[in-house]
Amino acid sequence: AYTIPSLALFVIIPPLIGISMIDPLNVIIALTVYSTALLLIAVPMALDTVPASVVDAADAIGFGRLRRTVTVDMPLALPVFTASLRVVVVTNIAMVSVGALIGVGGLGKLFTQGYQRDYPDQIIAGIIVTLVLALIFDRLVFLLGTLATPWTRADARVKGARS
């Protein structure tokens, strides 16, 4: 799904679900498709980082598959998943501006109107706003991931104390 160019996806979606080309839902669906494609790769990759010895230990003490997944696998995979989620969030912020090319608007209007009017300051403003938003949300997801995994901070402090 991620190999389909975004403009092509914006053209394909409306006839499939019966909406207008300039409906904001078109952009939302396209971004959802791209996000899902990235997350379908990210989740198994994150779960693969859980050490086999930890999985074996959880199985040995009698954890069922669901309990092990929720209480062992997912928490230990969270740092890698958070890194992938940061990529998804930043990608969505960057891609939402493409919606302006089909008339949906948003941040992309700064790019399209700046180009149409030959007004580079407007284009630069769009780049700066997009960059700042991406950095803010990237940092927010990073902080949430850090708060959700206090044991990774404790490991870093212990390693620092040993040095």
Image (tube, grey):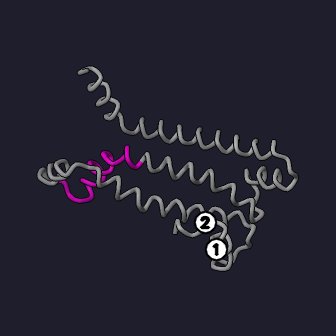
Q: Do the residues labelled 1 and 2 touch (CB within 8 Å)?
A: yes
The image shows residue 93 at horizontal and vertical percentages of 62, 50
Please tell me which residue is depicted at 75% across the width and 43% down the height of the picture.
124
Q: Which mark is residue 13?
A: 1
Give the amino acid type for the residue marked by disc 2 in the picture.
Ile
The image shows residue 102 at horizontal and vertical percentages of 75, 65
Please tell me which residue is depicted at 81% across the width and 45% down the height of the picture.
120
Q: Residue 29 carries which label?
A: 2
Q: In screen coordinates, is 153 left or right of 158?
A: right
Spatial distance from mark 1 to mark 2, Cα to Cα? 8 Å
Which range is magenta?
63-81
Q: Check the image and report above or below for 155 versus 17.
A: above
The image shows residue 4 at horizontal and vertical percentages of 57, 70
Q: Residue 132 carries which label?
A: none
- Looking at the rendering, in which quadrant would you find the C terminus? top left
* Main SS class of the magenta portion in the image: helix
* Secondary structure type for disc 1: helix
Give the amino acid type for the residue marked by disc 1 in the picture.
Ile
Q: In screen coordinates, is 110 left or right of 72?
A: right
Residue extending furthest toward the right: 117
Query: Which residue occupies the foreground of this view, 70 or 161?
Result: 161
* Secondary structure type for disc 2: helix
